[in-house]
Amino acid sequence: MKRIVNFWRILVAALQEIFDEAAYARFLSRNMVAPSGEAYADFRREFEEAKVHRPKCC
Amino acid sequence: MLHGMNKPFAILGWGSVGLLGAAAVGVVAVHRGEPINALWLVAAATCCYALAYRFYSRWIAAKILALDGLRATPAECLENGRDFIVTNKWVVFGHHFAAIAGPGPLVGPVLAAQFGYLPGTMWVLAGAVFAGCVQDFVILLFSVRRDGKSLTEMAKDEIGIIGGVVAYVAVIAILIILLGVAALIVVNALKSSPWGTFTIAMTMPIALLMGVYLRRIRPGKVLEVSALGFVLVLAAIWGGQYVSQNAMLAGVFTLSAPTLAILIMVYGFAASAVPVWLLLAPRDYLSTFVKLGTIALLGVGIVALHPTLHMPALTRFVDGTGPVFAGKIFPFAFITIACGAISGFHALISSGTTPKLIARETETRMVGYGAMMAESAVAVMAVVAACVMQPGIYFAINSPAGIVGEAPSAAAATISSWGFPVTAADMQALAHAVGEQTLYNRTGGAPAFAIGMASIFSHSLGGETLMALWYHFALMFEALFILTVLDAGTRVARFMVQDALGHVYAPFGRTSWYPSILATSALIVAAWGYFLWQGVKDPLGGINSLWPLFGISNQLLATVALCVATTIIIKMHRAKYAVVTLAPLAWLVAVTFTASWHKVFDPNPRVGFLAQARALAAGPVNGATSRLIFNNRLDAAVTGILIAMVTLVLAESLRQWMGILNGSKEARVKESPFVRTRLAEEQG
């Protein structure tokens, strides 16, 4: 049972990292702001600036 | 290597894996005549990956790289909560796999299936475990030991300024060619397909809705909104059939190849130049959601349904006369399949985001070597999807009209005369079953993959009635996937050009200066748009010239990455083990240089760019043929420039290696200083 819980936890964490939910959580914690539409827009702006460095494979 | 009390069990277990793998590879390699089951490919791949990971990658990690679990990584030393973040190894694995898995491992094996299932399968397995996985692993580790430096920075530091400049130019070149050929695949998949075009068009308003949801309703809940977007996309696929049956709507969404090409160029420019995160970010998430889901579904589907492969192990086209692309099995099979075996592009990701997330050096093996094995498994699935079709149908879909003729009866007769029987009635029935007007001349690999995937699933889930839905789901999956590569790639290339131009005129380097954004976006879109237009207007379908060009540039980038890796290994005083990177490097040099020579100088006009230009010039010349002649000469020049640049890197690397080995040069790697990790103590 413990293994299943651990597997589920890691799967969710991986999905949150792939889908940038974890990055948003870190943004909120770094800037000490509560989640909101404005905060998300600020996060996206910062994220898009950084994203131009990141290629995606063919 | 087998330690501990369980040694006899380990020997027995790994011995069994070895025997099963040998048997499966044997069946795949020597079986002739009767169709074989896809499970043999699955068994061969699984055993090869298991053995390679357990023994080869572990040996590399221990003997050559000496992975040190006590050495702090940049994620720990430079942790900033933004780029450098200590992350769980499985999370990094997922992140890395999602970044390296693009349309390449699906399209390349489908195109290479014209040689039969054997060459593609063997290259995907051997190429991955001995070349691609090794490249991704060592480049990731070397980047981790250099504070997450990029491939171009490492090339400059370890080989010299020439290495850095060539790596930089090669990256831009590969991006432009990749974007041109990727756009061509979408055009060929959607041309004259109102259902497919409608589905892809609907992803725009769906993405906008997702953007509004993320901004106004549940900020940041990306997984939730991606699942919602996925349901809406499924609804769009289902609705597409009614669009294709309605005369007026079908007329609106039936677009020619040139019209689609122009629309895609406009889209690419807008995606790069306009701050449209509201549209692009949700589409990117939706694409990733569909990609991961579909790959998992296809994997489960192939294992559970274990379809039969109808394509022979080897076809008559190993002699170089294939209709999908011209050229012999060597070297063309090895540049056609890049991403599933070895891809230089992966070196950019292994020295990009991933090294900044790795918590412990020892995890680079699982992430670098392991994720590439998963990518290779995706390529094996693509081989299966292409080879479950009757060969006649495969060739009818993938052969350009310039080879088999425009008329269905003529095309069917030509393909049947090659020994792959197919009738116009078969093709018409299949087109009808998947809701298309025609399936002839749908080059590029995406439609063939979609048919293969649809036929695998429709045999059990929904039967023939769901064939059209499965087909359009697969088509949507690939087109959506490629469009996100297009917009992300255009922005990455734009940024790199801005960076370079910033050294000439400082404001050009500012990513917020609008004249620079507009000018560089236009430049990049014009560059890949030119290749796209060239492909759309090519009577041989475009793929014949563009995909090899893409393969050559991608493998040349891998050559640069392996030069960097070999240089570092020699500098680490591990020259006696350098064969681990030297062998794939030598193979890639042989493959890419031979392929380039053929593409430029081969006297066969279907293979050589210059021969085709000469053949066109010998006939009646008008505006269209003048353009084709120019395009062929341009492609020859691009190939020549790429080869010349990589020759420079090879020569410079050789000079370094010889200098170090004969003692005239100091063997000093440019690693970050050793810092002991705190994570080991924290974790006990």
Image (cartoon, coloured by chain):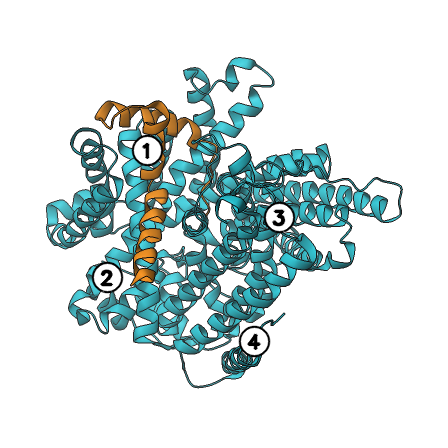
| Residue to which mark 4 is pinned | B5
Amino acid carrying mark 2 in the image: Trp
Asked if labels 2 and 4 share a chain, the reply is yes
Subunit bearing disc 2: B
Side of B107 where B334 appears, left or right: right
**Which hue belongs to chain B?**
cyan
Residue B366 percent coordinates (x, y): 51, 56
Give the CA separation, mark 2 to mark 4: 50 Å
Subunit bearing disc 4: B
Amino acid carrying mark 3 in the image: Leu
Q: Which of marks 4 and 1 is in front?
A: 4
Considering the numbered disc 4 on the image, is that residue within a helix, a strand or a loop? loop
| Residue to which mark 2 is pinned | B470
**Which hue belongs to chain A?**
orange
Give the CA separation, mark 1 to mark 3: 37 Å
Residue B179 percent coordinates (x, y): 45, 41
Mark identifier at residue A24: 1
Seen from the viewer's position, the closer of residues B89 and B505 is B89
Seen from the viewer's position, the closer of residues B529 and B117 is B117
| Residue to which mark 3 is pinned | B556
